[in-house]
Image (cartoon, grey):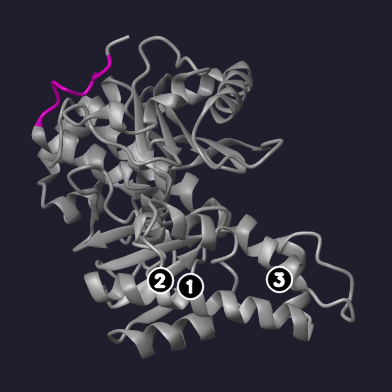
Amino acid sequence: MQSNPGSSLTASAKSIFRLLAEGNPSTRPQLGEVLNLSRPTMSAAMGELEQLGLVAKIGEVQGLIGRKAAIYRPGPQAGHVIAIDAGSTHVRLRVSTIDRRLLHSRVYRLPASQLLLGEEISRAVADEVSATLAETDEGWGPLRMIGIAVPSRVVGPQGDQNATRQEEIFSRFEPPADVPVVLENNVNCAAVAERSNGAAKDAETFAYVQIGLKIGMGVMLGGRLLRGRNGAAGEIGHLAFPMADGSRPIPGEIERYMGTEAFMQRVLATWPDSADSQPADAADLMARAGEGCATALAHVTRHAEDIGAIVASCVSVLDPGLVVLGGGLGGSSLLLPTVSDVANRLSYPVEVRTSTLGQDATVLGIEKLTCEQTVDLLLGERRD
C-alpha cells in the first residue's frame, strides 16, 4: 500500500487533515473558520480527503439557521499506530488512531528490573507486539508506524548510533515489514506528554525530572523538545558525583545512588529494630510514609532533599521556571514540598509540580510523537 496516500493533496486538504489529526472532530464551517478557507475551497478539499478515505463523517450537529452540519474526523485509511514504552520495569503498549483515540492497550511487568536496554526488554516488546498484531481489527485501518520509547539516549541517522544502546531494542524484536519505526528517549517522551496533556499544559519551557529505578530529565524549550547533539540533553544520571576530598566523580554514579534499588538498600540497612517490620519495597515505604510512620517519613524526606538538590542543579543550568516530577518515586506527592523547598533554597526561583499522568506519561508521549510523524508520512511532508 502507498505509504503517503496524501502526498498529492492540495495545501488546503493537507491543512484540514492536520487539524483533524490534532484530535478535535469538526464540521466544515468550523474547519473553514479556523483555516480561513472559503466554502468552495473547503468543499473541494474535503472531497479530496473523502476520496482517499482519510476523513470520515461521524455525525451531525444542528446549525444556527436550521441546517445540520456533518462532523468529521480522520477516516479508516488514515490508519493506526502502535506506541510502546519499553521501560526498565514494564512494557506499556497503546494502539491508537492518528488522532490519538485508544483502540487497544497492554501492560506487561518484566520479571526483573532492567538497568540497561537489552535482550529482556526487546523480547518483551516482541511478545507484546506479536500479541497485539494477532488482535488487530480491520476497522483500525493499516498500521502506519510503530513508536518505541527506550531507556537509552537516542540519536538520529546522522549520529553515532554505535555509541548508544538504542539498537538493542531490535536484538529480539523484528518490526513488521514495511512499517517505519521511530525511537525516542523515554524521559523525553514523558516531557512531551506533560506538555500536551499533563502538568505542563500551560508552559512552553519546563523540565521533566524522572526519579525511579533510574533518573533522567526531559527538557522543553519554547515548546520544542531539546535533544542535544549527542541525544544526551537531560542525562542527569551523568552529573558529576561524588565530589569530596578523597573521591573522584564516576560516570553514572549519581543514578546508581539515587535509583530506587540503592535507596531501598540504604533504607533497609538503617531501619531500626524497634520500628515496624521492614518495608517490602519502595511502594510499601511510600505507603507507610503517607500513613504517618515516622521512620518511613524520615527516609522519604531525606530522599526528597537529595532530589531537591538535583533539581536545583538542573535549575541552575536551565532556569526553566517549572519542573515536573515524575517516575516511580518522583511522582509521589509526598516528595513535592521538600523538593520544592530545597530546590528554591539552593537555586533560582522555580515552581515544582507533580506529574498528572503518572506511569502513562512515557507511552502517551511516544504516542503523540508517533502520530505526528505518521501525519507527516501520510502527507509526504516533514516539519522542522
**Residue at image coords 27%, 16%:** 3
For label 3, count other residues whose C-alpha is less than 10 Å away and answer few (under 14), some (14-19) or many (20+): many
Q: Is residue 117 visible?
A: yes
Mark 2 secondary-structure assignment: helix
Residue at image position (90%, 81%) is: 274
Q: Nearer the viewer, residue 155 or 24?
A: 155
Q: Residues within 10 Å of mark 1 (few under 14, many from 20)?
A: many
Q: Nearer the viewer, residue 41 or 113?
A: 113
Mark in front: 1 vs 3? 1
Considering only order in the chain, which callout, 3 or 1, is on the residue closer to the N terminus?
Answer: 3
Query: Is residue 259 highlighted in magenta?
Result: no
- Residue 7 in the image: state x and y as whole percent: 16, 22
Against 84, is 266 above or below? below
Q: Secondary structure at mark 3?
A: helix
Q: What is the magenta range?
A: 3-10
Q: Which residue is mark 2?
A: 310
Q: What is the secondary structure assignment of the residue under circle 1?
A: helix
Label disc, if present, on residue 351 of the rendered structure: none
Q: How far is mark 1 from mark 2, CA to CA?
A: 5 Å
Query: Mark 1 to mark 3: distance in Å?
Result: 15 Å
In the rendered view, does 326 fall on the left or right side of 222? right
Is the residue under label 2 in contact with that under label 1 (CB below 8 Å)?
Answer: yes
Query: Seen in the image, is 329 located left or right of residue 233?
Result: right
Residue under label 1: 307
Using the image, tell me which numbered label, if any, was put on residue 286.
3
What amino acid is at disc 3? Met
Classified by dominant secondary structure, the portion drawn in magenta counts as loop
Residue positioned 70% across, 81% down in the render: 297
Instruction: Judge whether residue 9 is colored magenta.
Output: yes
* Marked residue nearer the N-terminal end (2 or 3): 3
- Which amino acid does the dot numbered 2 rest on? Ile
